[in-house]
Image (spheres, helix red, strand yellow):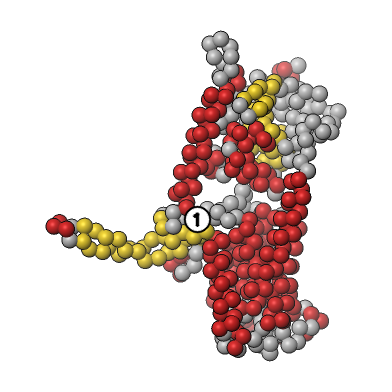
């Protein structure tokens, strides 16, 4: 059975380029690519980013897959690739591109016929692909500078004046992270209750020397209690920066598995190595360290910016030089920040907590990071196994039902 256009319902025509074959519609002027051809047209990074985003895309496309006729997924491209909404069928490994999308990278074959009727697709595709790669390289080069421009907008920059990091660019494809918002609201309400009941910390905090207090309920619940408003606001800010992207990337089930894993590992390592077993352990910091470790592995290219004081030389007449002070943005990859925090916790544990100095549970922080790494290891294994056996287009079962043909084309 021939592949059909998801817009017109008519059969698609095959065309060849340097990387292989693809299909196009003479009527709707859309193009259909396999995943391997998408790597040729859009580049390795572009095709990989589309495929990763399609895994957890919550929106269904109005278009049916030209092969299996199931609804495709609507995926938002990154801005450096064009920012279009692309239709992806993960079952058949096919990507549908509408007429107004990627006109230069994936040209319509009928627009590229030479004077003798021969196709010049390969020539133009090579040029457009080079332009796309050049555009991405310029985008990455600008983002990779250690010191440079910060985020736009006053509200986005405001946390930096308090010494907090701000996210330079989000890898999210949408804004649907209801679980993160729900957890933040719940923790604020819990803290209001704790503020009115000072004995709640002593009652529901986790004591390493009494791990089964309240039938073990404190083992997990203590992670969502906080000792003061500053402690709460500081933790919730970091939690929001990390959790929203992780929620969208992992999906609901795996997100809760990660949350449970880091909650358990935070209290478990506090139980094993806490220097103050008779004091209650509370706070979201262990969960944040676990999320930070997972975030650094899922999105290693994302950068966070810190506001710093800078100085640069200014030349005057007769060779005199003076130094001008100002402010700038130190832009660090998340994996660097995670490494600095983790090393700081390890050093602080041996220098302070193991000697019963200070009140910070560095053992819980280390435990949360280890729990996040263990979760990612199993997540990576499942992802790797899923990608080892791709479903070939030829082996995909097709339904007998066909999309209706518009009246104007009957």
Q: The residue tagged with tag 1: helix, strand or loop?
A: loop
The reply, left or right, for residue 149 in relation to residue 247 is left
Against 60, residue 166 (above or below) is below
| Rendered location of residue 112, percent (x, y) | 56, 19
Q: Vertically, is 11 above or below 306?
A: above
Quadrant of the drawing holding the C terminus: top right
Residue 118 x/y as whole percent: 58, 14
Q: Which residue: 46% across, 64% down?
A: 306
- Residue 401's image quarter? top right
Q: Which residue is mark 1?
A: 168
Residue 137 appearing in the image: yes
Count of marks overlaid on the render: 1
Side of 269 where 126 appears, left or right: left
Pinpoint residue 139: horizontal percent, then vertical percent: 48, 45
Name the spot of residue 281 as percent of width and height, x first.
Answer: 66, 82
Query: In the rendered image of this protein, does residue 321 appear above or below residue 62?
Result: below
Q: Residue furthest left?
A: 318
Residue reaching furthest to the top: 116
User: Would residue 191 be visible to someone looking at this image?
Assistant: no
Q: Nearer the viewer, residue 82 or 134?
A: 134
User: Where on the picture, by quarter, is residue 32?
Assistant: top right
Task: Rate crowding at label 1 as few (under 14), some (14 to 19) or many (20 or more) other CA atoms within 10 Å.
Answer: some
Question: Which residue is located at x 53 percent, y 63 percent?
Answer: 336
Residue at 86% from the left image edge and 28% from the top image edge: 400
Where 21 sits versus 225, above or below? above
Q: Residue at x 53, y 24 (%)?
A: 123
Q: Which quadrant would the N terminus be assigned to in this image?
A: top right
Closer to us: 191 or 250: 250
């Amino acid at each position: 059975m021939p592949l059909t256009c998801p817009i017109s319902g008519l059969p698609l025509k095959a065309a060849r380029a340097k990387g292989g074959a693809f299909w196009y519609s003479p009527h709707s002027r859309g193009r259909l690519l396999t995943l391997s051809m998408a790597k040729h047209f859009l580049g390795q990074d572009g095709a990989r980013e589309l495929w990763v985003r399609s895994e957890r895309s919550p929106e269904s496309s109005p278009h049916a897959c030209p092969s299996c006729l199931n609804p495709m997924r609507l995926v938002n491209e990154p801005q450096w690739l064009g920012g279009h909404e692309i239709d992806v069928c993960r079952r058949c490994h096919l990507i549908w591109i509408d007429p107004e999308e990627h006109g230069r990278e994936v040209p319509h074959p009928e627009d590229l016929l030479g004077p003798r009727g021969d196709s010049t697709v390969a020539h133009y595709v090579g040029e457009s692909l080079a332009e796309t790669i050049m555009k991405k390289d310029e985008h990455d080069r600008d983002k990779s500078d250690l010191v440079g421009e910060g985020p736009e907008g006053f509200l986005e920059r405001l946390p930096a004046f308090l010494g907090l990091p701000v996210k330079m660019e989000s890898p999210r494809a949408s804004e649907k992270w209801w679980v993160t918002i729900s957890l933040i609201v719940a923790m604020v309400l819990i803290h209001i209750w704790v503020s009115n009941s000072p004995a709640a910390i002593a009652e529901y905090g986790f004591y390493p020397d009494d791990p089964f207090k309240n039938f073990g309920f404190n083992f997990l619940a203590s992670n969502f209690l906080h000792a003061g408003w500053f402690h709460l606001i500081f933790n919730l800010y970091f939690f929001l920066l990390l959790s929203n992207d992780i929620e969208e990337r992992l999906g609901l089930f795996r997100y809760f598995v990660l949350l449970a894993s880091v909650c358990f590992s935070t209290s478990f390592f506090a139980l094993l190595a806490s220097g103050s077993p008779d004091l209650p352990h509370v706070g979201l910091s262990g969960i944040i360290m676990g999320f930070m470790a997972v975030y650094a592995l899922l999105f290693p290219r994302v950068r966070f910016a810190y506001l710093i004081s800078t100085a640069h030389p200014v030349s005057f007449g007769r060779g005199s030089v003076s130094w001008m002070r100002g402010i700038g943005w130190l832009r660090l990859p998340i994996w660097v920040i995670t490494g600095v925090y983790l090393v700081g916790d390890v050093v602080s544990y041996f220098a302070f907590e193991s000697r019963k100095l200070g009140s910070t549970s560095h053992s819980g922080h280390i435990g949360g990071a280890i729990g996040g790494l263990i979760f990612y290891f199993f997540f990576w294994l499942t992802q790797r196994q899923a990608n080892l056996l791709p479903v070939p287009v030829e082996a995909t079962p097709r339904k007998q039902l066909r999309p209706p043909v518009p009246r104007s084309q009957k």
